[in-house]
Amino acid sequence: MNEIKDKILKALYLLENEKEKFSDEKFLKYCETVKTNIIKAFKERNLTKDEAKPLLNRVNKLLDLSEKKTITYEEDTKICPNCSTKNRANANFCRKCGHSLK
Ligand SMILES: [Zn+2]
C-alpha cells in the first residue's frame, strides 16, 4: 500500500467513525480536502482508477450526509429578531436574550 493511499484511508476512517469530533463546518471542509487529495492522487498516478473510485464514493457519501444534516439544521432554527441568535424552531424565547420568538 502506498503512503498517499494510506493517508487517505486513515482520513476517511476518521471521518466515518469520529464524526462527532468535528463541527459541521469542519467536517464538510475536511471531506472536501480528502476529496481533493483523492483526485490529486489519481491525477498524479498514485492511485489507479479502481482504487480512487471506491474512495471517492465514500467521501461523496459523507458529503451528502453532511449537507443534508446542515440543511435540516438550518430549517430547524429560528433567528432571534433582537440579537440574531439561532434558536430551536420550537423555542418560544431566545436562549440568549430572552426575546419572545412567537
Ligand atoms: Zn435574542
Image (spheres, rainbow, N blue to C red):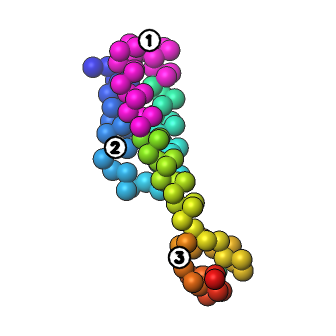
Distance from label 1 to label 2 (Cα)?
A: 25 Å
Between 3 and 84, the one nearer to me in the picture: 84
Q: Nearer the viewer, mark 3 or mark 2?
A: 3
Residue 14: x, y in percent? 34, 43
- Which quadrant would the C terminus be assigned to in this image? bottom right
- Residue assigned mark 1: 45
Identify residue type, mark 2: Glu
Query: Cβ(mark 2) to ligand 1 < 8 Å?
Result: no
**Secondary structure of the residue carrying numbered label 2:** helix
Which circle's residue, 1 or 2, is located before the other in the chain?
2
Q: Earlier in the sequence, mark 3 or mark 2?
A: 2
**As drawn, 85 above or below 60:** below
Q: Residues within 10 Å of mark 1 (few under 14, many from 20)?
A: few
Point out the frontmost of discs 3 and 1. 3
The residue positioned 57% from the left and 68% from the top of the image is 77
Q: Please name the residue shown 43% across and 54% down the image.
A: 22
First to last magenta residue range = 39-61
What numbered label is drawn on residue 7? Answer: none
Q: Which residue is mark 3?
A: 90
Residue at disc 3, secondary structure: loop
Query: Assess mark 3: CB under 8 A from ligand 1?
Result: no
Task: Give 2 or 66, whichever is nearer the viewer.
Answer: 66
The tag on residue 16 is 2
* First in sequence: mark 3 vs mark 1: 1
Q: Position of residue 67 (x, y in %)?
A: 51, 47
